[in-house]
């Protein structure tokens, strides 16, 4: 199942469903997008049950810039072509959550999806 939201030619897509993994494993969560914007701003958020979304990182070009709570040795993303996959390494039980890929266009509007 794939969720997508369109605004003109712009859209962001993220597969849905659980990603099975064990503690200590690495996982990659995919997010692809289509836009005519030369400098899209992409964000990854984590939301635990009954919690508020927390910013993991943001990407403008190249590698992501992480929030202090999410160390670069465990959480990383790199903007390549029309994709910004989030890689989580050395999985911990507390990593079990819903992850959102969001994209902000120049106007500040955000489009996003659940993984």
Image: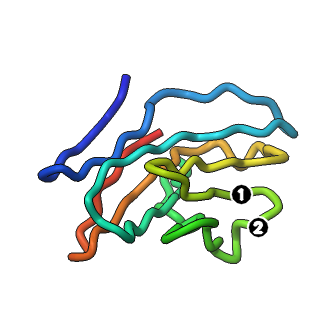
Residue at the limit of the structure toward the top, as seen here? 1
The x, y position of residue 40, in whole percent, is 38, 66
Q: Residues within 10 Å of mark 1 (few under 14, many from 20)?
A: many
The x, y position of residue 5, in whole percent, is 23, 44
If the image is split into quadrants, where does the N terminus sit? Answer: top left
The residue tagged 2 is 71
The x, y position of residue 111, in whole percent, is 28, 56
* Residue drawn at (41%, 42%) of the image: 114
Left-right relation of 93 to 38: right
Question: Is residue 14 depicted above or below 12 in this figure?
Answer: above
Left-right relation of 60 to 6: right
Residue at the limit of the structure toward the left, as seen here? 8
Q: Residues within 10 Å of mark 2 (few under 14, many from 20)?
A: few
The residue tagged 1 is 75
Q: Nearer the viewer, residue 55 or 41?
A: 41
* Residue drawn at (26%, 75%) of the image: 106
Task: Tell me, yes or no, whether the two marked residues, 1 and 2, touch with CB atoms within 8 Å.
Answer: yes
Q: Nearer the viewer, residue 46 or 65?
A: 65
Question: Is residue 25 depicted above or below 86 in this figure?
Answer: above
Check disc 1 and report its element: helix, strand or loop.
strand
Total number of numbered discs in the rendering: 2
């Amino acid at each position: 199942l794939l969720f997508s939201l369109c605004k003109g030619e712009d859209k962001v897509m993220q597969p849905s469903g659980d990603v099975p993994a064990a503690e200590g494993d690495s996982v990659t969560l995919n997010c692809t997008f289509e836009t005519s914007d030369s400098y899209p701003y992409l964000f990854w958020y984590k939301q635990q049950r009954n919690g508020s979304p927390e910013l993991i990182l943001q990407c403008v070009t190249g590698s992501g810039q992480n929030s202090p709570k999410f160390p670069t040795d465990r959480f990383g993303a790199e903007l390549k072509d029309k994709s910004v996959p989030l890689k989580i390494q050395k999985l911990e039980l507390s990593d079990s959550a819903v992850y959102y890929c969001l994209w902000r266009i120049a106007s500040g509007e955000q489009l996003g999806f659940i993984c």
